[in-house]
Amino acid sequence: MVVNFLYCIDIPGKSEKIEKTNCIRGWLLCSYPVVDVRVSGHFGSWCTFNYGISRPDLNTYFPMFPGNLTAGFNIETKSGTISLSERFPIEVLIKDQNDSTKSMHIELEFDPGEIQGIEID
């Protein structure tokens, strides 16, 4: 089973020259339906990952990805800031072709405005 992810960081924007932030917004698509997204690693205790935000614009560019209308996310800190030079580990729960839930662990790189791809097999 090959699983493909695409994601992009929208906020902070590419023109914002910052190293740390307490809020990151973007989108995450998967070649299988996404059930839930959780923060993992040391970020888990002080960050929240809110997934499922409306993004009707993604259907225009990525109609082949399920759930593209609600693939927006925001990451917020409960305290402190996130360094944009770090990778951000998340666990993505997906439904596979047999309707079973699978856990996929990926790391987001913060490169605002650039579409990133990850393939797991």
Image (cartoon, rainbow, N blue to C red):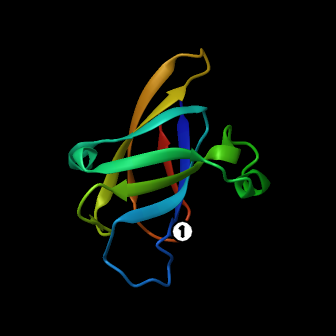
* Vertical arrangement, residue 89 with respect to residue 38, above or below: below
Residue 72: % across, % down: 58, 52
In the image, farthest residue toward the front: 78
- State left or right for residue 28 relative to residue 49: right
Residue type highlighted by circle 1:
Glu
The residue at 74%/42% (across/down) is 64
At horizontal 41% and vertical 28% (from top left) the residue drawn is 103
Residue drawn where x is 47% and y is 55% of the image: 74
Measuring from the top left, give residue 1's x and y in whole percent: 53, 27
In the image, taking residue 10 as reference, residue 106 lies left or right, namely left
Give neighbour class at mark 1: few <14, some 14-19, many 20+ (Cα, 10 Å): few
Residue receiving disc 1: 114
Where is residue 110? Give x, y as percent: 40, 65
Instruction: Please tell me whether residue 108 is drawn above or below residue 113 in the rendered image.
Output: above
Rendered location of residue 121, percent (x, y): 47, 34
| Element marked by disc 1 | loop
Q: Nearer the viewer, residue 46 or 58?
A: 46
Front one among 119 and 108? 108
Q: Nearer the viewer, residue 86 or 22?
A: 22
